[in-house]
Image (cartoon, rainbow, N blue to C red):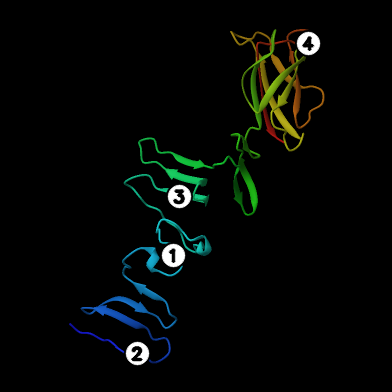
């Protein structure tokens, strides 16, 4: 065994000259080095992160005071479910990204307490998933509804629609649960007999004033009197934009 030691004073290893490193070898194989700029490298470090400066004792966490990651962060765990947790505190989960390893893999974004999730490209928000489940963008539906327009008006199913107002024969107001950003939206509609073939051609038209909270429509049929309005057992409206 070879030993280098100093009993009374600091032991100094000095690599003379500029840009010279101190190399640590075992059996002629380099296992570590200390560069001239003070950067230490090694094939491995034993022990926990508590033994290294500025790293937390738990190696599964990143110290928020030194949280910058300048290169790609890869998490690979094929034996179970790799998960990234972003927490405001140890008790409050702010975001979780999990990729399951079951036969039906699931990518989960879970924000708790409920917050909006925004997808931003080049400082522009292109898609927002609202905490109530709505997806807001220029390419997603802002509102849709399927309702019975004959007799007692009733919603069968809908998204972002609070109610339907019957304003007269063939005239309805679609009331939004959440206001749109502007009234400059567009709406597509269809109408007919829900239990069978619709004999007359139908048209769902804009009717009255549109606002950020209500879309007014009128259902007419072409084979009857000109401009005749009608109540139908099926009316569907889809809203984009706004």
Q: Which tag is nearer the camera, tag 2 or tag 4?
A: 2
- Report the Cα–Cα distance between label 3 and label 2: 47 Å
Report the side of 74 relative to 185 (left or right): left
- The quarter holding residue 199 reads top right
Q: Which tag is nearer the camera, tag 3 or tag 2?
A: 2
Q: Position of residue 36 (x, y in %)?
A: 42, 83
**Contact between labelled residues 2 and 1, with CB atoms less than 8 Å apart:** no
Report the residue marked by disc 4. Answer: 228
Report the side of 79 relative to 145 (left or right): left
Q: On residue 55, which mark appears?
A: 1
Secondary element at image label 4 = loop
- Report the Cα–Cα distance between label 4 and label 3: 60 Å
Q: Position of residue 119 (x, y in %)?
A: 59, 47
Q: Which numbered disc, 3 or 1, marks the residue that appears first in the sequence? A: 1
- Report the Cα–Cα distance between label 3 and label 1: 18 Å
Report the residue marked by disc 3. Answer: 84
Q: On residue 9, which mark appears?
A: 2
Assign the C terminus to one quadrant of the image.
top right
């Amino acid at each position: 065994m070879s030993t280098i030691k100093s009993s009374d004073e600091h032991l100094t290893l000095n690599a003379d000259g500029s840009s010279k490193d101190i190399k640590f070898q075992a059996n002629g194989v380099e296992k570590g080095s200390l560069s001239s700029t003070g950067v230490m490298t090694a094939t491995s470090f034993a022990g926990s992160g508590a033994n290294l400066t500025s790293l937390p004792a738990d190696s599964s966490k990143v110290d928020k005071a030194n949280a910058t990651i300048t290169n790609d962060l890869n998490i690979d765990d094929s034996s179970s479910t790799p998960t990234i947790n972003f927490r405001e505190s140890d008790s409050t989960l702010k975001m979780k990204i999990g990729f399951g390893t079951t036969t039906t893999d699931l990518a989960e974004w879970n924000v708790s307490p409920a917050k909006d999730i925004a997808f931003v490209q080049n400082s522009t928000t292109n898609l927002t998933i609202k905490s109530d489940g709505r997806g807001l963008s220029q390419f997603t539906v802002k509102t849709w509804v399927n309702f019975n327009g004959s007799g007692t008006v009733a919603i069968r199913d809908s998204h972002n629609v609070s109610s339907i107002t019957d304003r007269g024969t063939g005239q309805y107001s679609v009331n939004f649960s959440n206001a749109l950003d502007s009234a400059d939206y567009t709406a597509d509609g269809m109408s007919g007999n829900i239990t069978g073939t619709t004999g007359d051609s139908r048209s769902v038209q804009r009717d009255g004033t549109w606002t950020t909270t209500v879309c007014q429509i009128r259902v007419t049929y072409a084979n009857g009197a000109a401009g005749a309005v009608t109540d139908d057992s099926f009316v569907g409206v889809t809203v984009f934009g706004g």
